[in-house]
Amino acid sequence: MNLFVEIFYLAAAVLFILGLKQMASPVTARRGIVWAGIGMVLATLITFAHPHVNTNYLLIIIGIAVGGGIAWKTGKEVAMTDMPQMIALYNGMGGGAAAAIAAVELIKQHEMDSTVQLLAVFGALIGSVAFSGSLIAFGKLQGIKQLRGAFRFKNQQRINAGLFIVVAWMGLGIATSGTDYGMFTLFLFFALALAFGVMMTLPIGGADMPVVISLYNAFTGLAVGFEGYVLDNPAMMIAGIVVGSAGTLLTQLMAKAMNRPITNVLFSNFGETTGEAQEVSGSMKAIEAPDAAIMMAFAEKVIIIPGYGMAVAQAQHKIWEMTKQLQERGVTVKFAIHPVAGRMPGHMNVLLAEAGVPYDIIYDLDEINEEFRTADVALVIGANDVVNPIARTDPNSPIYGMPILNADYAKNVIVVKRGQGAGFSGIENHLFFADNCRMLYGDGQAVANELISNMKEL
């Protein structure tokens, strides 16, 4: 590779790293995305000057045009509620691309350095798992009937472990056999790796999707980094390492937020418990919008807890308008965000930023939890499992031990909910039956409108 190409790849890698650094803060995240995007454009354009490209310009242009056109159209049209599905799908495409690169290099059966061949196989395995697993995650998030919930059967984890051992054994054989492996062996290796990605994801319930998305994001980054080494492409190596390490750290944070070790995330049935769950006592008590408006308007402190239901109702703009009404009346309003609220990491933060909510009134779980005891009202809109007190008290609950937002410690709790059903995980929420909790039924956006109207009349 000539010096000219290497310099531009280095510049692209620096932009990737600086962009990721900027994304660490919501204040500079938009700038970071732009910088990383410029780095990607630079890396793509300089590839035309790569000596290995030769006469394949037409294929590159067609690939960029087709992929870029689809991405532009879907990116412009996808609703914010469907963003987790799109992230899962695009992440899977990255893993699939890395696996495809490995497949091409291995199909050629040319002499490779032993380290290079080993990394090619590792990238193929991880990329294939990320690809097929992300497709299943997409289906679960999309609500495809056959994939919803946790699909489990007897001895599933033993079968998965056996499948992984077979795939790893075949991969090691390919990596150490030089050019002596056959095409059937290679085909079977990829088929079983894809099957393992499917089997690994099927037992996972909807409540654990944020962990899954960040986990497969880490897999994709690692696969891209490995294949960058195979192709001797510094930009791919650095980008893959950056994405892989960031995804790994995020997975650890998500697992901590769910109170699950990484080994449990990788090898256990998520949310699997034994024993009988605690029965719910009491009853749900309804409240009307005028009474809820009075309760909040005359409060000193209100903490708002958004969840996926707010995203579905597209209520974030109205909630911000209501917040401004409360602030004008001298009420202190804060937003409390659980790390796994929504369907992907940072989902609620993105929605609130879209509505214009200032970053300085948005707090993470650790920052806000102690303040619920001094809050007059906790307004829960669309959240469920992240405020369920059963996580503290019932060892037989699938979410037992998960850190939750202490909404039940507030003097009053108002829950905006369309009906009386359980959340995405299917677990009954004991908060809804508490003495200090009132249910405000209706669509999130319509309810917010009612609250605003009633506040204006006070």
Image (tube, grey):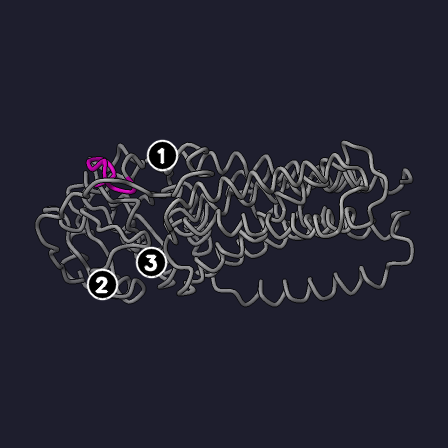
Q: Distance between the residues labelled 1 and 3?
A: 23 Å
Per the image, label 3 sits on a secondary structure element best described as helix
Q: In the rendering, at what x and y percent does residue 100 appear?
A: 71, 52
Task: Decide whether the magenta segment is chiefly helix, strand or loop.
Answer: loop
* Closer to the camera in the image, 44 or 95: 95
Where is residue 203 drawn, in percent x and y?
41, 49
The image's mark for residue 309 is 3
**Mark 3 or mark 1, which is nearer the start of the sequence?**
1
Question: How many C-alpha atoms fall within 10 Å of the one at disc 3: few (<14), some, or many (≥20)?
Answer: many
Tag shown at residue 259: 1
446 versus 46 height, above or below: below
Cα separation between marks 1 and 2: 28 Å
Q: Name the residue under label 2.
A: 419
Q: Is mark 1 on a helix, strand or loop?
A: loop
Residue 179 lies in the magenta-colored region: no
Q: Which three-letter amino acid code belongs to the residue tagged 3?
A: Gly
| Residue nearest the viewer, comparing 138 with 13 | 138
For the residue marked with disc 1, what is the amino acid? Asn
